[in-house]
Image: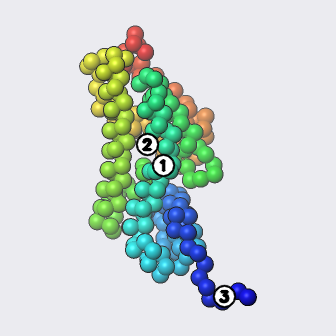
């Protein structure tokens, strides 16, 4: 005999992933509490009880995104034998990830919230911090290229990291607007042509 009124088991991680996909598709401001509760399979009071607020839910969702989505992109940056190949694989894997059709296109960290909002900037500050960490990862890989003699001593690693981070952010917008994988790869090709100029054609 079944136990009437027994609550269903709440899978917090699965529910958080559902919330992440709503935020990923609609952004912080565009995702309503009803959108989130519906996707997570809970009612609004339960959502508040489990996560505290929409802001807290978003911050948890972006943390999950950072830990689970696109890990291969950043792993390739570290493992590639040369800085040039690291940047190329970084961009190619970005194109592949952003163009997938079984999930929202583009990047939650780039598109989740670009303006100050009702959270007094906490959301924007968190995303800005994550983007800064990504920039640092690019810069450090380029600095390694200088240390290993692949890139000239005067190579501006910070400026190059900013350039390639900007390319990735632009690819996110392109993907959200419907750009195909091949179109994103064309952007990658252009960005790698710029490498020839920055690093020196004789060293590429």
Furthest toward the top, the residue is: 202
Number of residues whose C-alpha sits closer than 10 Å to that of mark 1, classed few (under 14), some (14–19) or many (20 or more): many
Label 3, residues with CA under 10 Å away: few <14, some 14-19, many ≥20:
few
Q: Residue 36, image x and y in percent? A: 52, 70
- Pick the front one: 148 or 125: 148
Q: Which disc is residue 21 wearing? A: none
Pick whichever of labels 2 and 3 is earlier in the sequence: 3
Dot label at residue 107 = 1
The way the protein has been coloured in the rendering is: rainbow
Q: Quadrant of the N terminus?
A: bottom right
Residue at the image point whose x is 43% and y is 36% from the top: 167
| Secondary structure type for disc 1 | loop
Left or right, 108 with reference to 199: right
Name the residue that disc number 2 marks.
Answer: 169
Q: Name the image quarter holding the C terminus.
A: top left
Q: Are marks 3 and 1 in contact (CB under 8 Å)?
A: no
Q: Earlier in the sequence, mark 1 or mark 2?
A: 1
Tell me how far mark 1 sits from mark 2, CA to CA.
8 Å
Q: Position of residue 32 (x, y in %)?
A: 48, 70
- How far apart marks 2 and 3 lie (CA) works out to 51 Å
Residue 98 higher or lower than 43, as above or below: above
From the top left corner, tell me how far across and down residue 180 is, in percent: 61, 40
- When the figure is inspected, residue 180 is found, relative to residue 13, above or below; the finding is above
Tag 1–tag 2 contact (CB < 8 Å) = yes
- Residue pointed to by mark 3: 3
Image point (34%, 26%), residue name: 144
Left or right: 6 in relation to 29: right
């Amino acid at each position: 005999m079944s136990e009437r009124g027994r609550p269903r088991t709440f899978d917090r991680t699965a529910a958080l992933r559902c919330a992440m996909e709503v935020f990923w598709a609609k952004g912080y401001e565009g995702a309503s509490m009803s959108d989130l509760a519906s996707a997570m399979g809970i009612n609004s009071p339960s959502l508040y009880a489990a996560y505290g607020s929409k802001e807290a839910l978003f911050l948890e969702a972006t943390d999950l995104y950072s830990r689970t989505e696109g890990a291969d992109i950043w792993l390739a940056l570290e493992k590639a034998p040369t800085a040039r190949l690291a940047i190329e694989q970084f961009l190619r894997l970005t194109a592949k990830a952003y163009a997938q059709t079984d999930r929202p296109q583009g990047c939650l960290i780039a598109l989740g919230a670009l303006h100050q909002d009702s959270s007094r900037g906490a959301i924007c500050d968190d995303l800005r911090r994550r983007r800064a960490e990504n920039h640092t990862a690019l810069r450090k890989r380029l600095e390694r290229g200088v240390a290993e003699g692949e890139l000239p001593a005067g190579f501006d690693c910070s400026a190059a990291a900013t350039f390639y981070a900007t390319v990735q952010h632009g690819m996110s917008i392109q993907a959200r607007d419907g750009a195909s994988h091949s179109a994103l790869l064309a952007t990658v090709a252009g960005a790698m042509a710029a490498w020839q100029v920055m690093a020196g054609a004789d060293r590429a």
